[in-house]
């Protein structure tokens, strides 16, 4: 895990790689090549995880210095690929996955991407053929941003490396700002909140042939991986559970490959608990204790410590419990925003930040985490609506009524409200308008009736844009819902949070649920074996029977890395919340409707209105804009 930088045409500037020293405090590399299109600079900050020796430092070269590379990430199946390449005559001088990646490209060209199991963002220079090849892993676990103009092009692991290049000016991308402010969604397109700064999306690559390409020319980005778009052939629940278990165990086995200690985040939910319990199984009785790190709160509504303790007792792990405080939300806001580069949508990011901070203090350099499970397995409770639509469409009345009754029993959701909510979508428009207040939180968005409203996307929402771009179509079932979550609406944003919070503490975060073999399988299940009654993630629950403690396997509430945000806002943070909202309104006058924003603020703080994460979005947008000197 590292930080990388590359520029072509621009004056080489080693400070651009030093900006991300936190991503790689173990070493620094810099090399400049002369090309027909101007100087090419490759920079690298190293976090040593596999082959800790200096021989594995980057920029790395092979084949008599024909190929050069800077690489951020891990290729988990590098041992298997090394043996395959050795059989073809390759000789290796390091034990690193980096050299295997570069040799794989030299041997197979762009087709090497299909062989990699891992997370990566890299730039390869072919000095003989004068070609640059740039790629990002299938789901965008590792970041890669760029700016391009008539003078040159530059790539970096973080946006801050590219600011103030021509094309990387500090102007707000207002359409993306509208997405964030209206729904909290970011990272769902190749655009960023910085006008002119773009990213390669997950599963994309780019080749620049300098014998033909000129700075200022358009970039031909290619998608080398796409998630399955159709259901796979039906299999039984037992077969699905067995296949899930096989793939998940193999993914965890690969993700444990490291020359430094590996720990895990532990929220007490199904996903992180599954990772810790499978780690325990694979490492065997003689392994040293697994270190787990958890964010805890005294507030009952977000207290998951009993579940954490159940996993710790089951695996005999060494537990580290961190206790974020209300004052941390503001005290650390600027620091977290600096590392995130773009605004973040709730104080839950603080909990994640504290977990990685605790891991660093304990000397753990690699952490496993459960990102991606909810998106591919329909783990969010909003998925019940889409599951119900399938049951209604297929006239499965018994299954529908069972779901209603089971949710009432396990989740305490009123059966009448459930039926109004799920059947209302098929009612005439006039009737839907009458029942809407019964099942939709009427937070209201009149506060956005300022200048920002003119920048709403044509599709009407970030979700609509993802549906249109990725040809997902109407979200009429959980199969398509999972596609939308994985390709744009949720996962890319969560991976950004994960990468920046971990790398701010020089920790490599690994996400074993995003082994693409596992994702391809679970997406292919479509509407099958994910939700049954009130059970989400049924295939995981069945596949890990006997591995997870029953207290975890059978739990049905869902929290994740949540903070008691509303209790903080209405209690010890109330004055700061008011001041911060006013600061945003003063920084960007006219962007939002000030009167409506204040009305929302008062209704939330004084009258118990549930405004979700809206207030924090307003607050953090102002913090981000001020820190980065952003113009509207």
Image: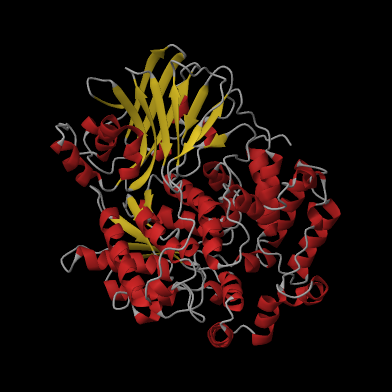
Place of residue 620 in the rendered image (x, y in percent of width and height, measured from the top left):
65, 49
Q: Is residue 333 left or right of residue 213?
A: right
Q: Is residue 334 visible?
A: yes
Among the 4 quarters of the image, the one containing residue 320:
bottom left
> Is 98 drawn above or below residue 298 in the view shown?
above
Among the 4 quarters of the image, the one containing residue 452:
top right
Q: Quadrant of the N terminus?
A: top left
Q: Nearer the viewer, residue 594 or 432?
A: 432
- State how many labels appear: 0
Q: Is residue 102 left or right of residue 595?
A: left
Q: Nearer the viewer, residue 478 or 280?
A: 478
Q: Quadrant of the C terminus?
A: top right
Question: What's the residue at 28%, 44% (across, down)?
Answer: 49
Place of residue 112 in the rendered image (x, y in percent of width and height, measured from the top left):
31, 38
Question: What's the residue at 48%, 64% (across, down)?
Answer: 374
Q: Is residue 185 visible?
A: no
> Is 43 drawn above or below residue 477 in the view shown?
above
Q: Nearer the viewer, residue 424 or 183?
A: 424
Question: What's the residue at 72%, 70% (across, down)?
Answer: 441
Q: Is residue 360 left or right of residue 13?
A: left
Place of residue 547 in the rendered image (x, y in percent of width and height, measured from the top left):
29, 74
> Is 21 drawn above or below residue 573 in the view shown?
above
> How is the structure coloured here?
secondary structure
Place of residue 85 in the rendered image (x, y in percent of width and height, measured from the top left):
19, 37
């Amino acid at each position: 895990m590292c930080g990388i930088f590359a520029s072509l045409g621009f004056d080489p500037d080693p400070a651009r790689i030093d900006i991300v020293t936190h991503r790689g405090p173990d070493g620094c590399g810099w090399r400049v090549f002369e090309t027909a299109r101007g100087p090419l600079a490759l920079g690298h900050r190293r976090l040593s995880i596999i082959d800790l020796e200096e021989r594995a430092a980057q920029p790395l070269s092979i084949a008599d210095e024909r190929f050069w590379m800077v690489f951020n990430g891990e290729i988990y199946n590098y041992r298997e690929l090394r043996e395959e390449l050795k059989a073809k005559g390759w000789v290796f001088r390091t034990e690193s996955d980096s050299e295997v990646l570069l040799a794989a490209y030299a041997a197979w060209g762009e087709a090497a991407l299909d062989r990699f199991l891992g997370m990566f963002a890299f730039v390869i220079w072919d000095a003989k053929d004068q070609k640059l090849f740039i790629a990002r892993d299938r789901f965008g676990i590792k970041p890669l941003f760029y700016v391009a103009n008539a003078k040159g092009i530059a790539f970096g692991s973080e946006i801050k490396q590219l600011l103030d290049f021509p094309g990387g000016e500090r102007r707000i991308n207002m359409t993306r700002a509208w997405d964030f402010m209206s729904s909290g969604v970011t990272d769902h397109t190749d655009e960023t909140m910085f006008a002119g700064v773009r990213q390669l999306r997950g599963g994309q690559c780019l080749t620049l042939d300098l014998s033909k390409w000129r700075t200022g020319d358009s970039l031909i980005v290619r998608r080398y991986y796409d998630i399955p778009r159709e259901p796979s052939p039906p299999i039984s629940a037992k077969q699905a559970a067995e296949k899930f278990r096989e793939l998940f165990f193999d993914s965890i086995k690969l993700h444990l490959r490291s020359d430094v200690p590996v720990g895990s985040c532990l929220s007490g939910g199904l996903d992180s608990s599954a990772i810790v319990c499978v780690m325990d199984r694979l490492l065997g009785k003689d392994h040293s204790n697994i270190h787990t790190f958890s964010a805890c709160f005294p507030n009952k509504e977000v207290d998951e410590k009993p579940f954490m303790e159940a996993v710790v007792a089951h695996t005999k792990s060494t537990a580290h419990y961190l206790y974020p405080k209300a004052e941390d939300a503001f005290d650390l806001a600027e620091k977290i925003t600096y590392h995130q580069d773009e605004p973040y949508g709730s104080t839950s990011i603080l909990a994640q930040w504290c977990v990685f901070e605790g891991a660093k203090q304990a000397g753990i350099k690699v952490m496993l985490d459960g990102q991606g499970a909810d998106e591919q397995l329909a783990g969010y409770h909003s998925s019940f609506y889409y599951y119900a639509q399938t049951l209604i469409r297929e006239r499965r009345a018994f299954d529908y009524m069972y779901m209603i009754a089971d949710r009432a029993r396990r989740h305490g959701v009123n059966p009448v409200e459930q039926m109004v909510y799920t059947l209302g979508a098929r009612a005439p428009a006039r009737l839907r308008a009458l029942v809407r207040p019964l099942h939709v939180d009427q937070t209201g968005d009149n506060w956005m009736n300022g200048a920002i409203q003119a920048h709403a996307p044509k599709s009407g929402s970030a979700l609509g844009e993802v549906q249109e771009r990725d040809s997902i179509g109407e979200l009429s079932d959980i199969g398509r819902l999972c596609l939308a979550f994985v390709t744009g609406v949720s996962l890319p944003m969560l991976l950004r949070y994960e990468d920046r919070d971990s790398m701010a503490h020089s920790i490599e975060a690994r996400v074993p649920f995003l082994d693409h073999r596992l994702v391809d399988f679970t997406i292919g299940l479509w509407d099958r074996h994910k939700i049954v009654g009130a059970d989400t993630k049924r295939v995981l629950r069945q596949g890990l029977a006997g591995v997870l403690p029953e207290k975890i396997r059978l739990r049905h509430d869902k929290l994740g890395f949540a903070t008691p945000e509303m209790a903080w806002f209405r209690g010890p943070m109330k004055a700061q919340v008011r001041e911060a909202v006013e600061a945003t309104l003063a920084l960007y006058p006219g962007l939002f409707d000030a009167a409506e924003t204040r009305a929302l603020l008062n209704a939330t703080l004084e009258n118990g209105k549930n405004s979700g994460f809206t207030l924090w979005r307003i607050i953090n947008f102002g913090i981000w804009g001020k820190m980065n000197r952003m113009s509207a």
